[in-house]
Amino acid sequence: MKRFSGKHVVVTGAARGIGFEIASQFAQEGALVSIIDINENSLSEAKNSLSKAERSIYTYAVDLTHRNLVEKTINTIESIAPIDILINNAGIAKETSFLEIEEKEWKNILDVNLTGFFHISQFVCRKMALRKNGVVVNMASKNGFDGEAGYSHYNASKGGIIMLTKTMAIELAQFNIRVNAVCPGYIQTPMSMEIDSPEFTKKFIDRYIPLNRAGNVREIASVFLFLASNESSFMTGQSIVADGGQLAGQKMM
Ligand code: NAI
């Protein structure tokens, strides 16, 4: 019997990057996996690659900021099988200095990274509460704990996720729903490679990361699976940092 046999897991933003690896690890561990992502092309590539390995995968092309569409999608997903685990991973980032951010950009980052989590979590947790069973794991970031210049909207959204995680945890414990978050540091994904040049990445690692390298998607996905499994059954409201030591303090120069 595999660790997640018989479990139905929903992973958002799983068409690529960390989300894809999370979906893939759940599928390898026996779960039925439903993926939600806004990017139809990446979504069908993800489905092909996971289905080749004969995994049970359903995909839904949905923008998580559209509340009505999210509600409909959750009803459809639940009609296939009750959702046991929700992984809120979808997110966007953009580097703009605080003085230059336009309202549209501010709203877009907060809508996807924070309000999007609220919409889907509310619909899924209402169903989990009726069953008195469920687990939610949210994607936050090391940037939810300390700031990084150029990312005030992103940092605010991730700090918001850490507090949302705590509050959901204390309200939903009575329904036997656990809620935790993962806070990665610098991970090499399509998102981070689109934002940062290889030269910047090297300098950043030399300056800030004690383990002297970027993290990879497998090292983050495994933390999500731990928090979704019974191995973490007495944990709720926690935000777990996986950042190569960056938040621990300044490294040797
Ligand atoms: P990515 O860009 O490779 O993947 C993000 C996925 O979310 C994409 O497939 C995208 O289509 C989807 N998405 C974006 N907006 C959406 C929307 N409105 N509705 C539905 N899906 C949407 O990014 P990556 O690096 O894998 O990031 C995943 C999560 O991890 C994000 O929440 C990010 O903030 C977080 N994170 C990433 C770190 C990194 O260094 N890469 C570090 C800390 C946190």
Image (tube, rainbow, N blue to C red):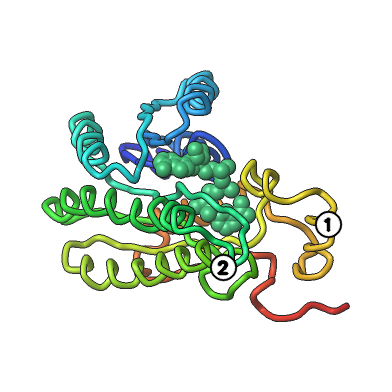
Label 2 within 8 A of ligand 1 by Cβ:
yes
Residue bearing the label numbered 1: 202
Secondary structure under badge 1?
Answer: helix
Give the residue type at disc 1.
Lys
Whole-percent x and y of residue 86? Answer: 34, 48
**Residue 87 position (above or below residue 7):** below
Outermost residue toward the right?
253
Question: What is the number of the mark on residue 227?
Answer: none
Visible in this render: residue 89? yes
- In the rendered image, residue 101, in percent from the top left (x then y), is placed at 54, 61
Seen in the picture, residue 227 relative to 23 is either above or below; the reply is: below
Q: Name the residue at 38% across, 28% down.
A: 59
- As shown in the figure, which amino acid type bears the numbered disc 2? Asn
Seen from the viewer's position, the closer of residues 161 and 232 is: 161
Tell me the quadrant of the picture where the N terminus can be found. Answer: top left
Around disc 1, counting alpha carbons within 10 Å, would you say few (fewer than 14), some (14 to 19), or many (20 or more)?
Answer: some
Residue positioned 20% across, 35% down in the render:
72
Q: On the image, numbered disc 2 is attached to which residue?
A: 143
